[in-house]
Amino acid sequence: MSFEEYAALARQLAEQRRAGERDAAAESERRRDLHAAADYLHQRLIAQGHRLDQLGRAIGIDQPPAAPTAAPGSAADPATWPGPPPSTGSPVVSGSGDGGSAGAAGVPGQAGVGAYPQVPAIPARLALPTAVSPAGAGVPAQRAAAVDPVVELELARRMADEADRHGQQAELLAQRPALLPTWSPLARAVAVYAACGAAAGVLMLTLVLASGVGLVDGFTLGAWICAGLPALAFFGGYLVLGRWGRPAMVAGTPPRYLPLGFLICFLLVPLGYCGYLLLFRALR
């Protein structure tokens, strides 16, 4: 072999070595990117889990009980499964582990739970079909497809975006009260106090009819019309706004417009009585 051939072979080997170093550097960079993406998704899913817990506590929903642990030696016990346990340092998504490094197979905010339904152990009589070789050895006819961590991380990112969107919608709904959710606080307070005043007006008519038959004297009727029924209407509206007019998630105490409610209740009932008297005299 001539010197030129040796030089060409050396150049070829050097080029192959540089190509191998470039491939190794690219693979190392790819692994670092996968680890960074998995860590970012892990932190994001943890934050989503905390936020969902806050929403659940705000609307009065307790956390679900923890799943019962499998008995040692049972089919659901991971210690009895064949093969070595999965490595926790690899960026490849395997459908188990924590919520961040598991990609699309992780559950937001919860560790150790898969997003996909757990497949029960397959009995021996339902095993996959095998192809028999000429030597008589059983060869599995099916193989599990390789999992692409990039695809799994992209699926996890999309699911996290969808969870963020639904979480924002839940927060908007939680910031609305159960009573007249589309109304403004002022309009809601006016409607509640006016409704309570109308209910007090019905009681006022009942007392007027009872006074007409002699069951209630004039002093008692005047006291209830001027003070008793307006006070009941005011406190009734105050309690209704505090119970059903308060959003599940709100910073501070929502306004109840006490002066406005006092004015509505203490003017509506006497004005209703005056209107009843004018109508009664007009009909006579």
Image (cartoon, rainbow, N blue to C red):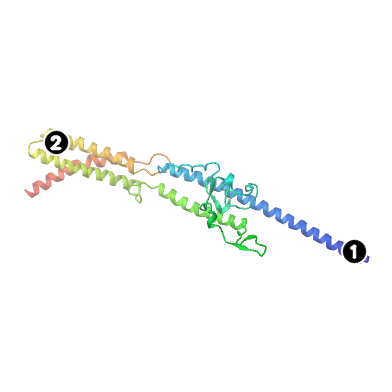
**Picture quarter containing residue 268?**
top left
In the image, residue 238 above or below residue 279: above
Q: Residue furthest top?
A: 219
In the image, residue 220 above or below residue 139: above
Picture coordinates of residue 73 (x, y %)? 55, 43
Does residue 258 appear in the picture of this structure?
A: yes
Amino acid type at image mark 2? Leu
In the image, residue 136 above or below residue 94: below
* Pick the front one: 23 or 76: 76
Picture coordinates of residue 86 (x, y %)? 62, 48
**Picture quarter containing residue 132?**
bottom right
- What residue would you read off at disc 1? 6
Kind of element beneath mark 2: helix
Number of on-image labels: 2
**Picture quarter containing residue 190?**
top left
* Pick the front one: 158 or 247: 158
Picture coordinates of residue 219 (x, y %)? 13, 33
Q: Which mark is residue 221?
A: 2
* Pick the front one: 139 or 176: 139
